[in-house]
Structure formats: structure tokens, C-alpha cells
Amino acid sequence: MKQNSRRKLILSTTVLSILATGILGTRQLYVSRPDYGLPYYARFTQAEDRWTALGGTWEVAEGYMRNDSNDRGAKLLTGLPNWKDYVLEGDFQLLGEGSAGVLARVTEAEVGENSFKGYYVGIRTIDNSLDLGAFDFAYHEAAKVTLPEPVRLFRWYHVKLKVEGCRITASAWAEGMREVKTAPLNDPDCFRSGSIGLRSNGTGGVWRNVSVTSIKLAEDAENRPAQNLPSSDGAARQRVVLQTGINRSGTKPAGEGGLFMLTTQTVLSLQFLPPFGAPMASVRGSVVLTRPAIYVQDSTGGVEVQSDSATPLKIGDEVEVTGEVNLDKSSPVIRKARFRILRETVPISPAVATANQIADGNLDGRFVQVEGYLRTISAGTDDTITLELDAGTQSFHAILPPGRSGSHLRGVALESRLRLRGISVVDPRFKNATDPFVILVRSAEDFEVVAGPPWWRPSTLILASLVALGLIFAFNYLYLLAKHWRLRAVADERERLAHEIHDTLAQSFAGIGFQLQAIRNSVPGGAGALEDQVDLAMLMARSSHQEARRHIASLRPESLGHIGLLPALRECAERMVKNGSVTVETYGEDSGRSVPPRVKDTLYRIGQEAIANSIRHAQPGTIRIRLQRTRASICLSVEDDGEGFIADSNRAGFGLLGMRKRAESISGTLTVKSTPRTGTLVEVKATVGSRFLYWPWRRAGLFPRDI
Amino acid sequence: MSGKTTRASVWTIGVLCLIVLAVGTHWIQSRRAPTIPSIAFIPQTAGAMLWEVEHLGATLAADKLKCHLYWNAPTSETDVAGQISLIDKVARGTYQGLVLAPNHPLSILTPLRRALASGLPVVIVSAPLDLPANDKLGYIVNDDEKMGELAAAEVARIIGGKGSIALVGFARYAPGVKSRVRGAERFLVSRFPKIHIVRRSAGAYSASRSEEVTNSTVDAHPELKAILSFTATSTRGVYTVLKSRSLQQAIQLVGCEQDSDLMDYLSKGEIAAIVAENTYRMGYQAVELIAASMAGKPLPTLSVVPPMLLTKGNINSAEASLFTGVPK
């Protein structure tokens, strides 16, 4: 490679690097602006799910975000950490006794009731108040104002949280209820920036119309007429909340007779009821699943509960269920159930179990956590997603709910180790006949990737092999390239030396010869001794000139690159015997097979030395140069018909030793055959490697096609 | 590239080829069907009369059909992991068929699916599973509902068609036991409405559990006239309590599933009756079906084998010997 090309390459690489760094840096600066991404309007659609849940069972439904869990401090976060001053607004409903609201400037969020930093405003049922406060892994209430009306469940409340510098203000209103504002929170050590979120505590909630706007935009909007909240009895509520067949007060419903007078029993004991006649039974437990079926769990087990009417149960609700027990299947089912909510409690924690333990059936209907290797992902019925997993000797399926599961599964590779939380069910209605059980996962947050696929998968191994092969080839290429450059540098240096000798020594010898000739011509006749001395000096000058020319010839390897090894040697020999009587004959064919430059150069040097030795010492009439190339080897011989000598390796001269060393450097062998008066044969054989290994490089132009 | 490298490459490829050849030959050899067909039989457990009689039937059928019979089982009917391990071993082996009496209707499904996927014809004996039958999967099951009916009828006969009884030996995930319970209760409800079931309790595969529930039942219901037990294990537990409290005459015991010690108690009159499974016939038929499947015939969907009521009066009969394995 020419110096210029290298310089251009380095220069262009540097320019590109600087350019890329500049673009990335500019983009980073742009993205980290405090108002980047604002205004933001949450659409709550499956396709645009950029929320991260920390606790709860969050699902999107027709423009609403819903948490059906009584989890303490369930959070759902979105936005950017650099959002600084903004107004966060949204509507929400409370689904039970507890609190719910919105979060601003959230940072360092983790799963846990108070595990984050940020500001919160929400409504709570315990004292019918609007609360503003700060979380710093503990809650610090800053301001509280009692609402003009008692907090009603399933009613839409609109809340606004404004964070501007270190001044935080909040307000809320509802249809038919005047707006109330909290006292401002002035915190000199305030949290400066952070994302936004939704939060519920001890109950579930439904959110909609959540937006984040810059302060200016919000102030402009304030001057416009306010938008009315739809009635809580409107269509939105009907879609989200259905309240039938339930007694939420905890008292006996009117007209139910003795339905709730039955003595409660454990879930486990249901199996000992008479198998005929649909016996009535009553159990108490915590709701562990609401969709696609309702499951209630007590300390002895879990049971499916079927009600003729939809019920607004939440995960964590402690209920008393009364109904007819059906024992036709392997698991009892309570049908025609009536519910009485006893209290809203924190959801039950999962029982950690292996697939083998769950396959035993004793955890049927219970909330469990199990791990397995993901084998397949397929679409199930009703927009659900079905995962097939293997764990030890067992295989099972998991059914993920519709909604956000799809986006959560994006990027999860097959063979990954997953941790799932859900209800283990052996009912054939949900599971394949070949599976011991199925896991009904409650929400998209109830599965996580424990570990990616193992690296020794066939696809990974193939990829790794290909990469390794590529690296080997690349290394080999670079090695050969470096070698090529080194040889080129040596050749360049030799050429420089040849030019130096030509321009200095050779020219001087020529000049000396010319001057001596002039002296010889001016010497008068009869000056015998002087004439002889001048003639001798002229002879020496001529000899030195010829020697210099030979050196120039031997140091100029450029002929190799253009006319091949055999023509180069012929040219070299002819140069050496110029104006002499020695005949040079060459034999061999240019097969077109390439020879590594190192081998070629070495052969050239050996041939050159052999020719020079022959001319210098053997006084030959003919010099024959042969070159034979086979698939795996190359053989060069230089033969003369000169005086010859007694070939003795112990008495080999410096030139012969040099040739032998050169031959060894290319793993070749040098043979010298000579006897007095029969001429001399110098033969060198060398192996050349498989074509395969240097084929790609030949295409790249590293090796000339001719020899 | 030098000649040395080329030679090394050739040697490496040669050695790799030899390794592949050796492994391939070994694999082909290991997969090749042996000259004598081999059938694997995995019962719930071994050493109990119920399964030894089945072993006898299977062995006689294998001898007749000139098949090799591999017989092995976990040491307990609750050792599900042990049975799974055996199924996997058979699926990896060179057997031409598998007869299985599952220890658990759910846990066994995945390994069974693996066995079927490896091409083995499988016959399930004793009690059915959720898996539907097909050409490669057949069932030979005990008529468990009939078993429950026979036991209930004997209880009703002994107590004169009225009085309090208890049911012991429920198991949530044992479809056979559930069928027995259903058969017994259906019979009693429809034929003997004056018989009152005072308690239904677990203990199908735990003698100590059945002892515990028997004790509490007897304490709570001194009017109890009989106990119907649905498995050999629960029968053993009930018998132990009744004997220790000298209630064998006051409370009659009717059990399900035969075993050596229970037969002994029956012959002494300490147990009123045992309803026995015809495991001999199940074992014999299962091996015959596998052999037929090996000959290319599809497996029948379901074959139901009737049980027999054994009492002190008929325990030594020729018919009973087929159930107890005691030659006459």
C-alpha cells in the first residue's frame, strides 16, 4: 500500500470518527434537554406501551390503564429522567378503600411501597383528603386538604400536579365538586427532575387522560374553558367497572336469606363433599386471579369460582364465597357463587415451587412462582399469548393476559430462563391434555427473564465458529499484509541503495576510467612502466565499475513484480554477461500459479547468487536456468558447463552458505552438484502452501498471478 | 501454507472422521432392534400382591409371545420422580413397547409424551389419564366405579341397609380412587337412602393419615357401623385402628385392592371383604396388545376389566386365585 493511500485512510477514519462523535454528542445534548419529549399524552394502547410497572397488575384497556391489585404502593412509570418543570394532569378512579394519584420527578424507583424519590398527589378514602407529599424512600406529607365531599369509589377525579423549580402545587376536582387546592410545597432541597408515574396504595385504580405539558403550555391551557369530566355513570365506567352480584359493605345482602349463613370451610375440604347433588359450601380466602377466571385461595389451597354475573373483584380482596360445589373434574369448582368482600388486603405472595412440585397437583388453584426454559411463543385465544416451557422432567404452558404482554415479550429469546408468577391450574379447560398444569399469569409484570439463552445453543455455536473463522482469516490476512509491506520496504530500500550506488560509485568509477583513459592517451610512447601502471589502474577501475553494476543489478528487484521470476533471472543473467561470450538459456513455464512473495524473492536471490558465482568462478559457455512449478512445490535450478569444483559441504564458501540459509528460510532444500570440468548444478526446492489459504488474498491483489 | 500444516490438517480431519464413524456406529448399534422384542412394564410399585399378580400375567404373556419383559417399579406408589426416571430410561432404550401404571395422573404426562414421541406404543393400565387414546396409546383399566359399587353393596348387606358409615382413602389426583368413591356413593344414595355417610376423609396412600382419620371418626361417631376404604394402604390403616381398639366386630371393614396381609386378615375374618382388581388379566392383556401393536395393529381405545369381591367364603376359590396369585 502506498504511503498516500495509508495517509488517506487514517485521515478519513479520523474525520469519520470525529463526525460520528459529534453527531452522537449533539443528539445526546438534544435528548437531555429538560423539555425533550414534551408535551406528552398517554394513549394507553397496547401498541404504545412505554410504561414500567413496579408492583400491581397493570393492564391497558381501551384508552385506560387499570391496576386490579390491592398491592401496596403499586407504581407505573414513564417519561424521561431529565423532565424538570412541568404540569402533570390526569383522571382516575379508586376501585376500593385506599389511595391513588400521580407521581412527578420520580427517580431511583424500585418495587416497594415507598421505594422511590419524587412527589405525589392523590386522593385517599381514609380521611377524604387530597394529599401532596414527597417520597424519599419514606413518605413525607407536605399538605393536605379535605375534599368538600366524601371520596366515592368508581368516581372520576381529575388531579393536577405542577412542579416548577422547588415549588410544588396540586389541585383536584370532579364533576359536581368544586376544585380544591393544596398549600404549595416549597422545598429548597427539592428533587430537580425525574419521570412521571401513576400510583395506588392498598387498592386498585383506573387512570386516563394522563398528560405532561410544559409550564407555559399549561398556563395557556388554563385560559381556555375547562373540559368537563364525564359522569361516573357514563360509558367509560360501564366499560371499566361492572358492579353486580357483590356485597361490598361486608354485611349480609338483603333478600339473600341464609345464603351467607353457611359455616365456612377450607378449600381443601371441598373435595370431601358428596360428589352428587351440587352441595352448597362457603369458603373464605383472598382473590388471587380475576381474569380469565376467578380464583380464591386460602391457606389450604385454591379454588375456581364461577359467578353468573361479572364482579369487580380485585386481586387481594378477601372474600367469602358461597355457591354450589361441583366435583366432576379433578379440581372442585364453586358455581353460582355470591361474594361478600370482607376487606381489601395486600395480595398473597406466591409460593415458590418447582415444576415437579406443581405437577403433583397439590398447588392447584394457588398463586405460585415457577421457573422454566422458554421453548415456544404462540398466540392464544382472545389475544392471549401462550408460552411453552420446560423445567427438569416437566413441560408446561403459561398463558399471558392480553394487553401489554406482547410488548414485554419483545426481545425475549427462546431458551431463556423465565420466572413466572401466576395461578397453577390443572383444569383441562385451560391446559393441553399432555401438560400436567398451566400457569395463568395475572399481568405482564408477572414474568421476567432470569437468564438469557445459554451460549452453547447450536445457533450460538455456529455463530461463534463463524466469528472465529472470520477472525482467523482476518488475522491471517493482516499477517500476510504486514509481511508483504515489510518485503516491499526491503525492496524499496534495496532499490534506493542501487540508485545510490549507480549515482555515486558507478559514476565515479566511470569518471575515473575516463580520466585514466585520457592520461593513457596523453602518455607518450615508450613510457613502458607508466603505461603498464595506467593500464592496470584502468583495468581496476573497469573491474570496480562492473562490480558496482553487478551490485546495482542484484539490488534492483523491481523486475520481479512485472515480468515474473524466470524472466527476471534471465534478465539478471544477461545483464551480468553483457558483452561477453556466455549464453543464457531459460527453461520452464509460467503456470500462472501464484507464489508467496517471500518464496519468490528468496528464489530470485539464490538464482542470482548462483549465476554470479558461475560467471565469477566457472568461466562457463552456457548457463541454463530452469523453473518447475507443481501444485505444492517449486524448483529452480541454475546449471553451467564451466570448470566445476569438488563439492564439499565442509568447505563451502560464504556464497554457498548464504544460499543454503536462504533456502532453509523458506523450508526449502539446496542441492549443489559439481565435479571438476563437468560444470555445476545448483538446485533449490521449496514447498508452496495450499491454494485455499491464500486464494482470497490473491484475489485481493496481494500475490501476483505470474511467477 | 507449509506442508507440515497441510499434513496436520489431513490428520486432524482423518481423526475426526474416525470419531464420527465410531460414534455413529455405536449409535446405530444401540438403536438397532434386538432379535428378541423387548417390552418394558412399569407398575406403580413392586412387591405388593396387586402388582406381583400383574407381573405374573405379564410374564406368562411375554413367554407365550416370546418377548423379553423388563419389569421395574419405584419402591413406593408415591415415588413419582422414580417412575418418571424409569419412563425416561425406557424411552431412551431399545424397547418396543411400554406398559405403565401411572403413579400420578399429572406428573407423568410430560415423560409419557416423551415416550410416545420416541415412537413407543404405550398401554396404560389400572386407571385412565387425561391423554386421549390413539393408535399408539391404549388403556386397560380397572372398572373402578364397579369396584366402588361392589364395596358399597357389601357394606350395605353387612349392616342391613341402614346406619352410619365412613369413607376413608380419598385422593384428589387419583382418578381411579375418585371413580370408586363416585361408584360407591351413587350406589348408596340410589339404593340405600337410610345409610348415612358421616365422614369422608383422605389417606389413600398414607396409612398413618388413614389411622388418624379413623381414630377421630370412631371417637366422633360411636354409632358407626362400617368403614369403606378405597385403597390397600388406607385399608391397612383402618384395620390397625380397629384392631388396636378391639372394634373389629362392632365396625365392619370393607376395603379395595388386594394385598398379602389384607388377604390374611380376610381369611381370619378380621376384614369383612376386599374388592380386588384383576391385575393378572390387565398385565396379560397389556403385553398382548403391545405385541399386536409391534405387528402393526392399532391399539384398542379402552378395555375395562371387572373387579371381584373377595370374602372369607370365596377367597380360596379358583376364580379368586387369579386375583391373589395363589395357585389352586
Image (cartoon, rainbow, N blue to C red):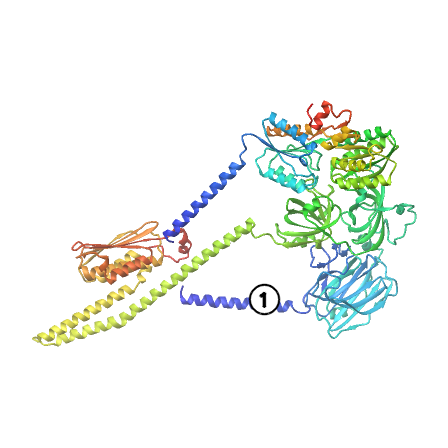
Q: Position of residue A107 (x, y in %)?
A: 70, 66
Q: Position of residue B205 (x, y in %)?
A: 74, 39
Total residue callouts:
1
**Of A531 and A119, which appears nearest the observer?**
A119
Query: As displayed, is residue A268 above or below residue A473?
Result: above
Taking the image as shown, residue A121 lies to the left or right of residue A376, namely right
Mark 1 neighbour class, 10 Å CA radius: few under 14, some 14 to 19, many 20 or more: few
**Of A103 and B238, which appears nearest the observer?**
B238
**Of B154 and A503, which appears nearest the observer?**
B154
Q: What residue would you read off at disc 1?
A: A24
State the quadrant of the C terminus of chain B: top right
Q: Position of residue A171 (x, y in %)?
A: 81, 67
Give the structural element (helix, strand or loop) at label 1: helix
Query: As displayed, is residue B283 above or below residue A2?
Result: above
Q: Is residue A590 visible?
A: no
Q: Chain of mark 1?
A: A
Query: As displayed, is residue B222 above or below residue A380?
Result: above
The answer to which image quadrant residue A496 occupies is bottom left
Query: As displayed, is residue B75 above or below residue B68?
Result: below
